């Protein structure tokens, strides 16, 4: 079983071959945006961090940007630095360079401001984009897949159909020696004991319980019960009555295989295969960023009400569990798992369709959000205040 991917100098395999434009701080976003608007096949990570944060968060932002630039879906990287930011832009360049891909940096203050930085950035990004444009796909084993999964804009059909389909694909990938990473720690609440039992060791189970307790304690530190934000109003309108009910449906997408361990938000997937948890929130901009930074080539999202957005360098496959939503938003949804609800197909049948779709996307087929350019919203999950 194979797909057609880009083999990188460090041995990882990409599903896309973009030149990434990486602002090291929010202040550099405008320069990076103009560069991306002028140079073909560039993708920008326009986040809102990198300055006036506590050291742990500045380290977190630096490490996340390193992960994004090191992603196998990125063929080359241009770092856009302001020059006085709190992130470590020199480390950012050095760590991406260790992957063997071409990487350059421009510094806005050093170059003399916006207009000069834009011109230098366009010239540099053009050089990088041309340098990687001749890369050819080659057949690679499906065990090279690192797939991330989540659910968004869920309703009652998510846990009965689309999450089940993703769970089927997850199990199939693990069984062939690939890697699957899932997160949304907020949506383990009330079901964490079920996940903990699937840990390959008692220590893994303990760690799963710990990240859920930590997430809940963070909400309580502000005097709030997390249940006041979960389920969301859209979830409730879609038929989900409580966070526990939502969680029981959400964890179905992880399938049934043992959980190898828990990754921190900035961790990059290593050579160890299997099913992993990444400690993330549930909101799309932050979890998609964390999953792309972990080295995932694609993401598969389950939705019932319709979650249309994607990510700049990581194709996002939308599996829709609600047949009415699929009909209404068919230009955004990639696969209709609502046929399970109507009784026209089984979970296994749609699961096989989803797996075949996954291999095609990994080999170059566009997802719906890629084809219309719906992938601009990203952000980095930080823990402390802006100061």
Image (tube, rainbow, N blue to C red):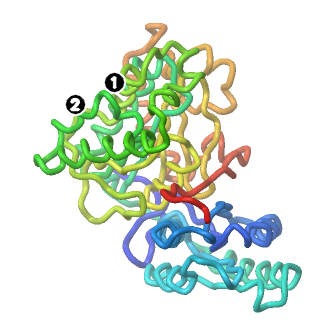
- Residue 244 in which image quadrant: top left
Residue positioned most to the right: 115
Residue 378: x and y in percent read 62, 53
Q: Is residue 58 above or below residue 324?
A: below
C-beta proximity under 8 Å, tags 1 and 2: yes
What is the crowding at mark 1: few (fewer than 14 residues within 10 Å), some, or many (at least 20)?
Answer: some
Quadrant containing the C terminus is bottom right
Which numbered circle lies on residue 168? Answer: none
User: CA–CA distance between discs 1 and 2?
Assistant: 9 Å
At numbered mark 1, what does the secondary structure look like: helix, strand or loop? helix
The residue positioned 64% from the left and 79% from the top of the image is 85
Q: Nearer the viewer, residue 34 or 357?
A: 34
Taking 343 as reference, is 190 left or right? left
Looking at the image, which is closer to me, 69 or 384?
384
Image spot of residue 194 (x, y percent): 22, 31
| Badge 2 density bin: few <14, some 14–19, many ≥20, Cα 10 Å | few
Q: Earlier in the sequence, mark 1 or mark 2?
A: 2
**Image-based side of 252 in relation to 58, left or right:** left
User: Which residue occupies the foreground of this view, 94 or 43?
Assistant: 94
Instruction: Where is residue 61? Give x, y as percent.
Output: 52, 67
Q: Which residue is at 45% across, 69% downward?
A: 56
Residue drawn at (44%, 38%) of the image: 356
Query: Which residue has dot 2 on it?
Result: 194
Q: Disc 2 on helix, strand or loop?
A: helix
Q: Position of residue 250 (x, y in %)?
A: 39, 29
State whether residue 193 appears in this view.
yes
Q: Is residue 344 above or below residue 38?
A: above
Q: Which residue is mark 1?
A: 248
The total number of labels drawn is 2
| Residue reaching furthest to the top | 343
């Amino acid at each position: 079983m194979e797909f057609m991917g880009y083999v990188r100098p460090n041995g990882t395999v990409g599903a896309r071959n973009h030149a990434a434009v990486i602002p090291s701080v929010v202040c550099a976003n405008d320069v990076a945006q103009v560069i991306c608007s002028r140079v073909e096949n560039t993708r920008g990570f326009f986040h809102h961090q990198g300055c006036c944060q506590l050291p742990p968060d500045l380290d977190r932002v630096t490490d996340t940007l390193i992960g994004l630039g090191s992603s196998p879906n990125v063929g080359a990287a241009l770092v856009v630095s302001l020059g006085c930011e709190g992130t470590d832009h020199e480390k950012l360049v050095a760590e991406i360079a260790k992957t063997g891909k071409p990487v350059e940096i421009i510094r806005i203050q050093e170059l003399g401001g916006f207009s000069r930085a834009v011109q230098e950035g366009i010239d540099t990004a053009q050089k990088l984009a041309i340098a990687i444009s001749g890369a050819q796909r080659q057949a690679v084993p499906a065990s090279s897949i690192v797939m991330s999964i989540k659910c968004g804009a869920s309703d009652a059909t998510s846990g009965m159909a689309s999450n089940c389909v993703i769970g089927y694909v997850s199990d199939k990938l693990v069984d062939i020696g690939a890697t699957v990473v899932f997160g949304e720690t907020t949506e383990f609440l009330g079901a964490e004991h079920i996940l903990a039992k699937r840990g390959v060791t008692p220590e893994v189970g303990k760690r799963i319980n710990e990240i859920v307790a930590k997430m809940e304690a963070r909400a309580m530190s502000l005097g709030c019960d997390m249940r006041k934000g979960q389920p969301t109003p859209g979830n409730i309108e879609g038929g989900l009555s409580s966070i526990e009910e939502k969680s029981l449906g959400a964890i179905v997408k992880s399938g049934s295989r043992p959980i190898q361990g828990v990754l921190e938000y900035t961790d990059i997937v290593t050579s160890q295969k299997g099913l992993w948890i990444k400690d993330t929130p549930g909101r799309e901009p932050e979890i998609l960023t964390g999953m792309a930074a972990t080295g995932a080539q694609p993401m598969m999202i389950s939705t019932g009400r319709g979650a249309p957005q994607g990510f700049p360098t990581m194709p996002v496959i939308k599996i829709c569990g609600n047949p009415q939503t699929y009909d209404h938003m068919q230009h955004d949804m990639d696969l209709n798992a609502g046929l399970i609800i109507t009784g026209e197909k089984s979970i296994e049948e749609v699961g096989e369709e989803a797996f075949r779709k996954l291999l095609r996307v990994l080999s170059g087929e566009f997802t719906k959000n890629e084809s219309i350019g719906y992938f601009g919203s990203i952000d980095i999950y930080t823990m402390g205040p802006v100061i």
